[in-house]
Structure formats: structure tokens, C-alpha cells
Image (cartoon, rainbow, N blue to C red):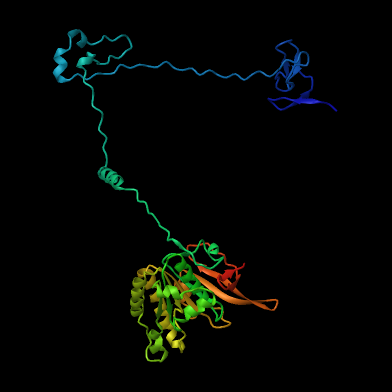
Amino acid sequence: MMITVKCPKCQVDNLYDTEFCCYCGLRLAKDCPNCGSSNPNQFTYCTQCGQSLVSPPVIPIPVIPALETKEESVIIPEATKEEVPEEIKEEPKAEAGEEVKEEVSVAPEAAAVPEPEAKMVPEEIIEEVPKAEVEEEAREEVTIDVMMPDRILTGISGLDSLIGGGFLAGKVYLVSGESGTGKTVFGMQFLYQGLVLGENGIYVSAEDKPAHLVVDAESLGWDLRKYVLERKLGLMDISSYFAEMRAGRATTIDVDAVISDLSRQVREFNARRIVIDTIAPPVCGQEHYSYIQEYVRHLVAAIEDNLGCTVVVTSGIPAGSAAFSRYGIEEFVAEGVIVLGMASFNGYWFRTLAIRKMRSTFSDLNNHFFEIIPQRGMVIRG
């Protein structure tokens, strides 16, 4: 097979050892700058001495043209023209091929410095700048200090750790559940915890006589009777406000009257905790539900706006219902919702507690088993 070399100029194939192109005459060999040996054009290094046959690129050096200097013309004010010497006033003589420029040199002290040229600024910009500066100066840094309410211990063993340390002070919380799940015990324990800590309370009953609270507490080993006698625990019965509706003679409940009586009790006992058991008693007829809902909504709003107490309200749930409250409004207006229930496991029944809602608080949504133990009350196991 014949080895050929392509001419870089005309692209014609030539024999490998050809010195000149057979078509265009371009020299295809390279002379070594070190030993002078002839090498094929495609070789990079000399075959005799190893000298590089590639010439370094030539970097052109830019030529910088000489700077032309021009004499600045000076304007002579009228007042100083007569003081210029005669020799300075003489015009320079023109040389061959040059144009004579009429320029006059003046002594530095006599030269007038030209004022800088005024730039025209649109009127809209002139008006905007002062306004923006005034607004910038008038702008003050505003810091909003958000104060979170204090946490109130519930007294329920194992609950506070599940709701961020307790209830938020001054809020209303709902405890709902079927009959026998422990709603009244929850409220009683909440009040008892406050009394132990020096926080007076009020127990409000809308269905049964409030005196039964003292008897129920004694069955658990808690002496609430002494706190009643010491005027640290108030008992209030509001069942009469619902009597007319139960009898079918009225459709509304006087929320203002309930709040007025409750406010008087709060001031009298200097109360910090309130339990309303239940928030509204059962009534006959679905036609009354809308009136009860309005009552509950206004009652909760008035409590949080006027009383300054942390409140637990209870609501019964019909057996087998998946609802969170009796009237379907309580869970929406309350700050938090705790649902008590019953569960069967291996033939045994257990009470359960679930945190269904807790505003401004990270909470555990799992069901937890609890027991009611003398002296300790409700104790959450897991």
C-alpha cells in the first residue's frame, strides 16, 4: 500500500517523502532549525535531533499612537482684556501648510473658570425627589411584639405533655363524649388543680344541681367542700335559663343574663378557672338547635372577651355517634377539642382520650387510654 501525504494548500495526495507538491509546488518538507535535516511537513519533531518543528505563534505587538495634545482655548472676560500684555495678544505666525488658530493665552490669575453646564431635570422628577426623601425620613421601623398567653396546667396526669404544656390562658376548651366517659371528672380535676395552685374557680351546671360535684369529688378523695366554705370555689346553677325552652314556651336564651350572672360570680370569687357542665342541656325538637347554636356561639365569644378566665365546657354525644358535640357548633368556636370515648380490647373495655383540635399548639392526634384512679383522678396510660 502506498503512503501518501495530502497537500495543505490544494489537497492533492503526494508521495510520503515528496519535498514539493506535484500540483501546486508547495514545499511539503520542514527543515530542522537545530540540525538542518529535512523532515516531512506533517512531522512535529525532527527525526535526527528531536528538535520541535512547530514554530511558536507570533504575537503582534500593538502600536500605540502618540497622543495628540491640543491647546485649550481660554475665554478672556471683558474686564480683564485691557490688562493682557501686548506680547500675549500677538497672533502666532502661520507656518507652511498649517492653519492658524486664533488662540490667546492668559495668565492663570486672569483666566475665568467656566461654570459647569446645568443639566435640565424634568419637573416630574424634581417633584418626586423631595417627596421620596420625606417619606424615607418619616418611615419608622415598626416592631410587632406578639405575646403568647400563659399555659394553664390541666391537672390531668399525662395530658399537658401532649398539648404543649397545658391550656392557653383565657381560652375556652371543649371536652365531649358519651355518657360515662369521664367528662365531669375531667372538669372537676381541672378545678381541683387550680385550687391546689391557688387559682379560685367556679363550677357551672346547666343540667344537674351543682352540689353533686362535692359528693363526686369526695368519692375520689378530693375535699372540695372546704374550698366552697372558704369562698374559693363557687357553685352556679343556670338550668333555669333553659326551662322556658324545654317547656316549649320560648325559642331563645338570654345570653346577656347568663354572662352577667357569671361575671358577678367571677368578681365575687376572684376566679381564674371555670367549668360549664354542660354548655347546653338536651332540648326537645330539632327546631331548637339553631337557637342553641347561636347561644353557644355568643356565650363562648362573651366569655373570652369579658371574663379573662380559662374555661372548660362539656358536651354530651349521643351513643354511637361520630360527632364531636351535641349541637355541632361547640367544636368550631372552642380553642381546643378533647373527645373522650370507650374502646373494647380482648373482651375488656377501656376509656380513651383523643385530642381532635388544639389551636396554636402542636398536639398528638392518637387515641390514648386512661384510667380514673382514687386520689389521682384521670391518668393517661398511653
Residue 311 in view: yes
195 left or right of 103 in image: right
Q: Is residue 325 visible?
A: no
Classify 259 as above or below 198. Answer: below
The image shows residue 171 at horizontal and vertical percentages of 43, 68
Residue 303 location, quadrant: bottom left
Q: Nearer the viewer, residue 298 or 86?
A: 298
Q: How many numbered dots are placed on residues in this image? A: 0
Q: Position of residue 337 (x, y in %)?
A: 50, 71
Q: Nearer the viewer, residue 352 or 73?
A: 352
Which of the 4 quarters of the picture holds residue 19?
top right
The residue drawn where x is 46% and y is 74% is: 224
Left or right: residue 285 versus residue 27 is left
State whether residue 125 is above or below residue 118.
Answer: below
Q: Quadrant of the N terminus?
A: top right
Q: Is residue 267 above or below residue 73?
A: below
**Considering the image in quadrants, where does the C terminus appear?**
bottom right
**Residue farthest along the top direction in this orientation:** 87
Residue at (78, 13) in percent of width and height: 48
The residue drawn where x is 41% and y is 92% is 247
Q: Position of residue 223 (x, y in %)?
A: 48, 74
Q: 291 or 25: which is nearer to us?
A: 291
Residue 172 locus on image (x, y percent): 44, 70
255 in relation to 309, above or below: below
